[in-house]
Amino acid sequence: MKGLSKLAVFAALVMGGGIYAAVPVATFAESKTLALQIALDRRGFSCNAIDGQWGRMSQVALATYCAVNGYAVPPTPELARDILFPRERNLFRTETVTQREHDALVRIPATPEGKSKLKTMGYETIMEMYAERGHLTEGALRRLNPGVAWPNPPVGTLVKIPDFVLPAKGPVASVLRVTLSRFEITAFDEKGRLIALFPCSIAADKAKLPPEGELQVTTLIPNPDYTYTPDRVSRGGRIARRVFPPGPNNPVGTSWMGLTLPGYGIHGTPKPERIGCAESHGCFRLANWNAVRLRKMCETGTSVVVEK
């Protein structure tokens, strides 16, 4: 795939450059780093959960966006915001907490049996709900909305979050590349152009990592359920499988893309802030909003190349 080595060089250069200190601003909402993360996310170059802090995943998202578009990487996120997205407007929208949202909250039991008895694995708090809706960390949500009674503000509370509206018809991915060493999935169109980047988590146990090579997407499932199988069974005991209902707190989140390697897939997660490390059971895990976006770019038969 043309351009991959160039992208890797850009990413390596930026990742090796350290973390830039943010320039003090009047309020968190006016942070140019925050604005840059939102602008990149809107274009499909995700830094994972937006937090207003300039770390590795933000650096890679910016470097990749610049490489794809032929730009030099600005030396600071503040300059990147001013140079690359000077006219980016309407970064936020304000929503009102409703009684319906409170009524939809659930308590997730600790046991597999308890989880299997739920009707849905929905959000446990309004804070969790709005953080995911705005692609934010919960800490960033708090900073955007000081004075709000988190984690469950009362009905009628006004909450500011980044504004994301996916186009009715987005770009179509022809090939996905899962790069294990960089904890990322990149999507390419039929002409080989890179059109999106998403941070992911991979298996902590190297024995469970899929072999390098080409796979295909076999299924595309929104709001999947999840079949839980215990890791250990007592001698002579029966395997007690449990089916967990759909919802954002389901272990595979709000989206599943099955692959030709049995048992493996690309899916969401109820813990987006832990993306970008080795801790999954073998599948490729993305923040729920990124898993949904990627699924909508693909179809059955889409090629998935796994590489180091």
Image (tube, rainbow, N blue to C red):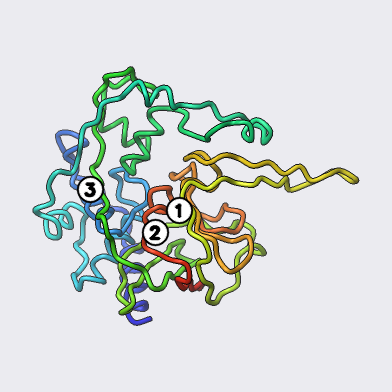
Q: What amino acid type should be assigned to the residue bearing mark 2?
A: Leu
Give residue 294's mark: 2
Q: What amino acid type should be assigned to the residue bearing mark 1?
A: Leu
Label 3 SS: helix
Residue at 37%, 40% in the rendered image: 132
**Who comes first in sequence, dot 2 or dot 1?**
1
Measured in 3D between alpha carbons, the distance from the residue under mark 1 to the one under mark 3, in whole angstroms, is 22 Å
**Furthest residue to the right?**
236
Give residue 286's mark: 1
Would you say the residues marked 2 and 1 are in contact, meaning their CB atoms lie under 8 Å apart?
yes
Label 1 SS: loop
Number of residues whose C-alpha sits closer than 10 Å to that of mark 3, classed few (under 14), some (14–19) or many (20 or more):
many
Q: Quadrant of residue 13?
A: bottom left
Give residue 43's mark: none
**Who comes first in sequence, dot 3 or dot 2?**
3
Residue at 26%, 55% in the rendered image: 168
Label 2 SS: helix
Q: Nearer the viewer, mark 1 or mark 3?
A: 1
**Who comes first in sequence, dot 1 or dot 3?**
3
When the figure is inspected, residue 95 is found, relative to residue 193, above or below; the finding is above
